[in-house]
């Protein structure tokens, strides 16, 4: 409208379109890396995919989780990241990947009878920090607990 008032128009996507986007977002694709000699050999769009792992690494993860279920001990995941994952630069620690990982998977681990422990290690920037952020670093940094 031209009368100065704000107006909003809501457009609803079809359920099929939303479902299709989710399926594309959360899919597992196995790639045989033994035949990859350079980046040119990777599948098209590989740089937009979520993450990579090898069969050996995935088997090791399965073995470690199974061991924790059998022994009823903690399963610790360590995220190594940059200063943004620690809550600096206008970000909150609970918005980082470690906190999201913990909130998504803690229920699954609870059902398995395993306590999930998530740790974050990273370095804050060396310049551009305010006095408050420097004081927090001197006291050991921020905690996402």
Image (tube, helix red, strand yellow):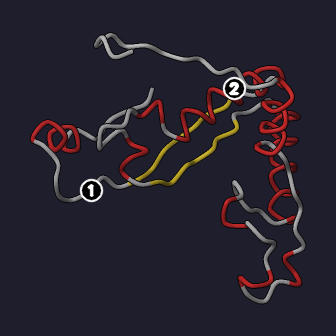
Where is 109 relative to 67, above or below? above
Residue under circle 2?
106
Q: Quadrant of the C terminus?
A: top left
Say what secondary structure mark 2 lies in: helix
Tell me which corner region of the image, top left, top right, bottom left or bottom right, holds residue 13.
top right
Q: How many marks?
A: 2
Q: Which mark is residue 53?
A: none
Q: Nearer the viewer, residue 131 or 119?
A: 131
Tell me which corner region of the image, top left, top right, bottom left or bottom right, holds residue 9.
top right
The percent position of residue 46, horizontal first and vertical second, equals: 73, 67
Q: Residue at x 78, y 36 (%)?
A: 22
Q: Is residue 41 left or right of residue 103?
A: right
Q: Nearer the viewer, residue 84 or 10?
A: 10
Given this view, does label 2 or label 1 mark the residue nearer the observer?
A: 1
Q: Nearer the viewer, residue 72 or 11?
A: 11
Say what secondary structure mark 1 lies in: loop
Q: Nearer the viewer, residue 26 or 100?
A: 26
**Mark earlier in primary sequence (2, 1):** 2
Check whether the beta carbons of the residues at disc 2 and disc 1 lie within 8 A of each other. Answer: no
Tell me which corner region of the image, top left, top right, bottom left or bottom right, holds residue 67.
top right
Q: Is residue 74 left or right of residue 145?
A: right
Q: Residue at x 29, y 44 (%)?
A: 89
């Amino acid at each position: 409208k031209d009368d100065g008032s704000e107006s909003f128009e809501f457009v609803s996507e079809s359920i099929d379109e939303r479902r299709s986007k989710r399926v594309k977002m959360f899919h597992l694709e196995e790639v045989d890396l033994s035949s990859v000699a350079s980046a040119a050999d990777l599948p098209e769009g590989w740089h937009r995919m979520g993450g990579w792992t090898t069969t050996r690494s995935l088997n090791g993860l399965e073995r470690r989780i199974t061991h924790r279920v059998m022994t009823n001990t903690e399963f610790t995941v360590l995220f190594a990241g940059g200063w943004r994952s620690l809550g600096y630069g206008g970000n909150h620690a609970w918005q980082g990947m470690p906190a999201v990982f913990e909130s998504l998977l803690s229920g699954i681990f609870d059902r398995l009878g395993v306590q999930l422990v998530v740790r974050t290690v990273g370095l804050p920037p060396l310049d551009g920090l305010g006095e408050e952020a420097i004081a927090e670093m001197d006291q050991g940094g921020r905690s996402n607990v």
